[in-house]
Image: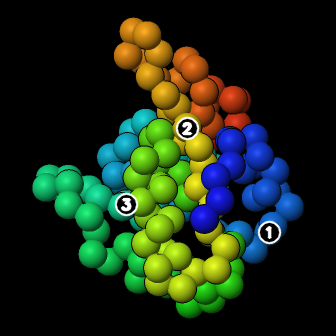
Amino acid sequence: MQTLLPNDARQLLDSEPDALFIDCRSEMEYLFVGHPKGAHNVPWNDGPDWEVNPHFVQNVKKLAGHVSARPVMLICRSGNRSSAAARALEGAGFATVYYVQHGFEGDLDTDRHRNTVNGWRHDGLPWEQY
């Protein structure tokens, strides 16, 4: 598993057209907070119970076309869920797994707000909301 800063992650995705980009936040975060353009939503955990998704690895395998050599990039809100999800994918045999440090919304600032210090959106990378 490798960690990349948001801008480095974008560059890797641009240079690796076969890379699979997974947003592992909840469905509500993906839909209502926004998400990186081109990212597929496969929640690592989701409400109402917030337990780890027992189908996560299988869902990613399906999106990858069951090709464990295909590079996979993971992103979540701040990097915690995506690092756990990356470990699960490596344990399932995925050879090239990355996760985005600081995630989509970034770390908390001194007022406990996100999107002001770092992260995908803070860095001005392409995202959408719907």
The percent position of residue 47, horizontal first and vertical second, equals 20, 53
Q: Nearer the viewer, residue 95 or 68?
A: 95
Please name the residue shown 54% across and 85% down the image. Answer: 93
Counting residues from the N terminus, which is met first, the one under dot 1 or under dot 3?
1
Residue 104 is drawn in which quadrant? Answer: top right
Q: CA distance from mark 1 to mark 3?
A: 23 Å
Counting residues from the N terminus, which is met first, the one under dot 3 or under dot 2?
3
Counting residues from the N terminus, which is met first, the one under dot 1 or under dot 2?
1
Tag nearer the camera, 3 or 2: 2
Mark 2 neighbour class, 10 Å CA radius: few under 14, some 14 to 19, many 20 or more: many
- Number of residue marks: 3
Q: Is residue 34 visible?
A: no
Q: CA distance from mark 1 to mark 2?
A: 23 Å
- Quarter holding the N terminus is bottom right
* Outermost right residue: 15
User: Which of the numbered marks, if any, corresponds to residue 17?
Assistant: 1
Please name the residue shown 70% across and 30% down the image. Answer: 124
Residue 59 is drawn in which quadrant? Answer: bottom left
Specify whether 31 is left or right of 128.
Answer: left
The percent position of residue 121, horizontal first and vertical second, equals 61, 32
* Kind of residue at badge 1: Pro
* Kind of residue at badge 3: Pro
Q: Nearer the viewer, residue 118 or 90?
A: 90
Mark 1 neighbour class, 10 Å CA radius: few under 14, some 14 to 19, many 20 or more: few
Q: Which residue is mark 3?
A: 43
Tag nearer the camera, 1 or 2: 2
Q: Secondary structure at mark 1?
A: loop
Specify whether 23 is left or right of 48.
Answer: right
User: Which of the numbered marks, if any, corresponds to residue 102?
Assistant: 2
